Image (cartoon, rainbow, N blue to C red):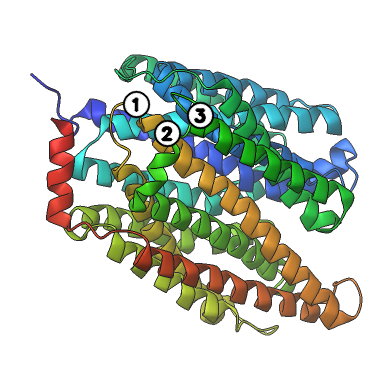
Amino acid sequence: MTRSHEEPTGRTVLVLMCLAQFMCVLDDTIVNIALPAVQKDLGFSGAGLPWVLNGYLLTFGGLLLVAGRACDVFVRRTVFLTGLAVFGLASLACGLAAGPAMLVALRIVQGVGAALLSASALAILTATYTGPARARAFGVWGGLSGAAGATGVLLGGLLTSGISWRWVFLANVPVVLAVAALTLRRVGPARSPVRPALDPFGALTVTAGLGLLIFGIAGGERSGWISPSALTALAAAVALLAAFVMVERRHSSPLVPLGVFARRNVTGGAICALLLAGTMLGTFFFLTLYLQQVLGFSAVRNGIAFLPFALAVVLSAATSSRLVPETGFKPLLMGGFALLVVALLWLARIGLDGDYWTDVLGPALIAGAGLGTVLVSSVTATTQDLSGEGEQGLASGLVTSTNQVGGALGLAILSTVAFARADTASGAPAAKPGSLLAGFHLAFYVAAGFALLGFLVAALVTVRTPGRALNEVQRMARH
């Protein structure tokens, strides 16, 4: 007798995979709040401190496509457990770090574990669930992924203020141990019946290319886009990614078969995921700065202020997961991006004498609803046409890598325009709330432009699959 995906084992798999993804996303924002304490305790320089974040982002984003393909070549559970081990050991070592260089190096290792963990978790979900059950699973996945960012601000503030910054890393260890123990008991060691051959040159060029792209973006944001280091990294990234395309065209079993991008829903879904990440990571960053630097919120109060946003993400993702089988993903993509445009244009009007209840809460709830809706529908769009045997890892790699690269690119662009505008408004390095606010306004307008572009991509690129037809396609895929 075939086990239903709705039975407890299926739900346990969902909980474990979503918990792993929650840790990966959480470990970015939770560290933000702890950075001042880290700098004081370990003696970081101002230029070195951002690499506590960038080191993690660099390897996390750069290795995702390779990690995704590993899930198609090797046993998915083995890849997942390897990611857990690397992530957990690196978290423990980060919490015990004795100096700046040691912490940055360990964050790089932690990013390797996060790439393996995130890609394999989504691949396991894609292989485990089909039809409406998959839509519901993606709803939980999307809701928790979006809420992890807001939750990280609150937990980071509580742990740093109440115990020590080291616990933002050490808190991962018991969670990793529990997830590993349950995974060994409840997740089967399945592998794809179709096992693509390894593509080492493709893996090397895409990993190095994406890593240098993220490095150049992060460096350009802080040292200037025409600085030698940024230009060299970006030029090398372009060259390596071009080489990757050439390698993939010639390989018999490419890491990323370029033909998949002829499937409009794959291309449209990936672009929408990239634009969503760029829009929301930057928005989250600047809204945090507004609450703390303009309205004077503490780190803990800032985290509490984001809880309604997190709740809106979870509820909208759950609602969207129920609607996808009925309506298809295209109207949800368009509706979610429309909500984001409205929220960001509202935020672009906040003032120095703003009030959380009248000026922030409303757009935050609308943005949360839009984020949860687009998260679920973009993952569904990208993975729907990549659900065949041997493609689950590819699908997970595309989804997670576009999120990481989109987040890095969006934050860099929004930071550059915002702080340039703030400097112009003040005539000097921005330090006054008034000049900062001018930069925040421009950042929110540009982010609204990203969301509008996402709306247009959803409307013009993705192909609308009627809900009932979608159910039939997924039903046939199971057989």
State yes or no: discs 2 and 1 in contact (Cβ < 8 Å): yes
Residue 227 percent across, percent down from the top left: 87, 54
Q: Amino acid at mark 1?
A: Gly
In whole angstroms, how far apart are the C-alphas of marks 2 and 1? Answer: 8 Å
Q: Amino acid at mark 2?
A: Leu
Residue closest to the far front: 250
Name the residue at 11% across, 22% down.
2
Q: Which of disc 2 and disc 3 is earlier in sequence?
A: 3
Name the residue at 42% across, 69% down.
455
Residue 402 percent across, percent down from the top left: 52, 47
Q: Amino acid at mark 3?
A: Arg
The image quadrant of residue 39 is: top right
**Camera-side residue: 199 or 472?**
199
Side of 40 relative to 279 (left or right): right
Q: Which of disc 3 and disc 1 is earlier in sequence?
A: 3
Disc 2 element: helix
> Dot 1 corresponds to which residue?
390
Q: Is residue 406 above or below residue 187?
A: below
> Dot 2 corresponds to which residue?
394
Residue 369 percent across, percent down from the top left: 39, 65
Quadrant (top left, top right, bottom left, bottom right) of the N terminus: top left
Q: Which mark is residue 250?
A: 3
